[in-house]
Amino acid sequence: MRILLNCAVSAIALVAGSTAVAQTAAPAETAAAAPAEAASDGPQLDDIVVTAQRRSTDLQDTAAAISAFGGATLEQDRVLSFEDLAGRATSLSFTALSPLDQEFNVRGITNTRLDSPTADQSIGIFFDDVYVGRSGLFNFDLYDIDRVEVIRGPQGVLLGRNVVGGAISIYSALPKAEYGGSLTASYGNYDEKLVKGHVTGAIADGLNGRFAFQVRNRDGFNQDIAHNVDLDNVDSVQMRGQLQYKPEGSDFSARLIADYTKDKSNGFHTVVVDGPGAGAGPWSQARARVAAIRGSLSPRESLPDWNTYKGDVAPTPQELDRRAYGITLQLEKGLGDFGTLTSITGYRNGRAYSQYDQTGIGPSNQYGISVPLLFRSPVRERERINQLSQELRIVSPEVDDTGFDWIVGVYAQRDKVRKNDTISFEILTPALPTLNGESAWVNNGKNKSYAIFGQLGYRFSEQFRIVGGLRYTKDRKSGTVTGLAVETGDKFSPNDPVPASPLSATFTEGGGYTANYKDSWSQLTPQVTAEFKVNRDILVYGTYSSGYKGGGFEDDPANANAAMSSYDPETVDSFELGAKIEAFNRRVRLNVAAFSMKYKNLQVTQTSQICLCNITDNAANAKIKGIEAELTVAIATGLSAYGGLTALDTKYIDFTDSVGNVNDGKFLQRTPRYQWNIGADFTTNLGAWENGFSAHINYNKQGKLSWQPEAIANEKPYGILDGRLTISPTENISVSAWGRNLANKLYRANVIAFFGDEASRLGAPRTYGLELAIKF
């Protein structure tokens, strides 16, 4: 760590000594950082405008670690999803075992397998400044986007609860008065078809509108031949409409946004492989025997490492039906010298149904396989969600030389979540006879959160400013859960009437429990930042910040006592030193940050091998240290390059898991030791076509990570190469050839360890295609 810090300090000193006074460039319309040709000084990097601190500020003048990507950059990199975004954003990684269970990791902080109606996220997701609480509501593609901001580190004052590790803010493109639009059609391997577009323009004086849509369909990368179902396919429709009212000469504006998403994909392909322990696990035994009977089960078997993963597709969602919509109303009114009043009202509603096949052999055991333990298909999950939120804030005018600036606000949110789960067990040999049957849960949760926050800054001079803030949050969570033993006994053994699990061995068929749960928590989260502008090209800052993630209750609790037992909030205290530097007449941009975090009361979910149920508890404390660097260089006219690096040193301080493993000193689960990426963009004339040819390449590398706290199931380092070539006969017409994972790297994107098995979701293989884009 000391070596990394010394390198950062040396880099700052080196660049500071060579910094020249730069010619001012006009702010970029989006967050893209492409070279901009100056009249006499060669290429320069554009300004990047962000709003992470509730004001429009230049990224280089913002004392926070932020990665920003404009809509043009997202299009060029073909960033269609959060998983794609993780390949570009520093310190961000993404995993998902199912479409309803998605996990973001920023700086080692992640939300892992927390999906009860009262569970919160560790990384906040905001869409047009509206917090999106449930992962089933934010699995939308990134289309018609103005910019995406990835804010790293706790943001407990301005963004509030559930931003313990950071936040991802997505901003849709604004309506414009000028009439225009776009239409894009793409076709790729796996029969991928994508059509998207938008239209915008004035409807009346002061009233502009915008409509955007995307339709995407793709065959699966893999196939469950037992049920003749494509897996890892895509079948989605999305649309968004907007109205913006801003009378000429008025300090009032209103913006109404409505969006809709429908996803009928089949879900993810998962294979089960033996873990490093002795003996084969139950899933992998079944997989091996099905493979022997049916032969190879995946078109990817020709890859060099395929023998490691060859086998059945268990556990895997066999059906997904997810629909969600949202409505956002943004109101803004100028208050003269007092500042600006902003109101943001958000409503989101969604429902999802997912069906899992836990072995791939089907409910009737059509292959006659006998193994110690199998999950009998299917496992079913239903979820209905509605969320209402309201924020009011006043932001004072900015101060250029000396004086105070401030932000005050209030926030309220109410969620209602209904979750129905059904889990089945089937014992095909008498090794574990007490684990037969089917259990079901109906869980109705209500979550309420209230907050008041304020931030006060004082600028001592044009160079030096100190800002401090405080937020008070109150959470209340309650609900009712019913657990039921639907059926008992082994259907393959009529003489085995043993009750179901994981509810309880004491429940007879039709028995169960109903329990009411309720708890509340409150937290103060402060933040203090000191920033110093060495000159117009160098900003250094230091920040102390804290983050808070609300407590909650168990998902699918085994009995009434477990249903009524809550786990506590988790908190983070973070110290960060950073520098933002531009040099060589704005041809070089270097942003670095070093941080140390103390993580308390981690909410950890593990599968107990006693009851075969998930147990969530405040099982650990941890320490996280790291360094980040982002570099962008305008090499020549039409040629730029970029790179990013994250190196982490993490460890559990006090963590004994549900089966007694002492994990003190081990690296945090699902956290890469390092991540780095490099890329380049090139544009040149092609004959008489101005800027008629462009090329883009990106390579990202992820270091070793451990999927489980005990560091047994590990993922080796791997790298992904993406690229794009574009020909543009005119400014408004382009044809592109794109490719992702061009080296066809085989890697695992998620793993759940269970009884010596590793249920492994594979990453996407090589994909490629052609795209036609028209602007008008």
Image (cartoon, rainbow, N blue to C red):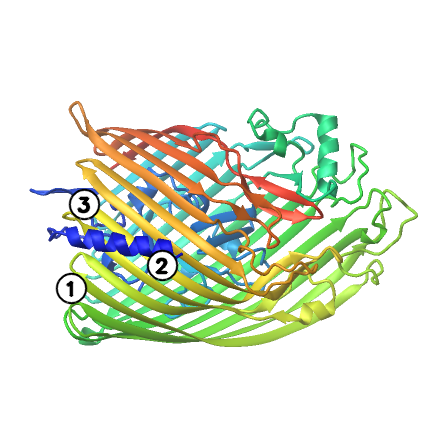
Rendered location of residue 557, percent (x, y): 69, 63
Q: Which residue is mark 3?
A: 587
Rendered location of residue 22, percent (x, y): 12, 51
Kindly report which numbered mark, 1 or 2, lies closer to the viewer in this rendering.
2
Q: Quadrant of residue 384?
A: bottom right
Q: Could you tell me which residue is drawn at 28 percent across and 30 percent down?
A: 734
Q: Amino acid at mark 1?
A: Gly
Instruction: Give whichever of discs 2 and 3 has the lower sequence position.
Output: 3
Rendered location of residue 397, percent (x, y): 20, 71
Q: Which residue is mark 2?
A: 594
- Could you tell me which quadrant the N terminus lies in? bottom left
Q: Nearer the viewer, residue 486 or 396?
A: 396
* Marks 1 & 3, CB-CB < 8 Å contact: no
Instruction: Give whichever of discs 1 and 3 has the lower sequence position.
Output: 1
- Could you tell me which quadrant the C terminus lies in? top left
Element marked by disc 2: strand
Using residue 549 as the reference point, say whether residue 340 is left or right of it.
left
* Marks 2 & 3, CB-CB < 8 Å contact: no
Using residue 145 as the reference point, say whether residue 559 is left or right of it.
right
How many marks the image carries: the answer is 3
Q: Disc number at residue 249?
A: 1
Instruction: Give whichever of discs 1 and 2 has the lower sequence position.
Output: 1
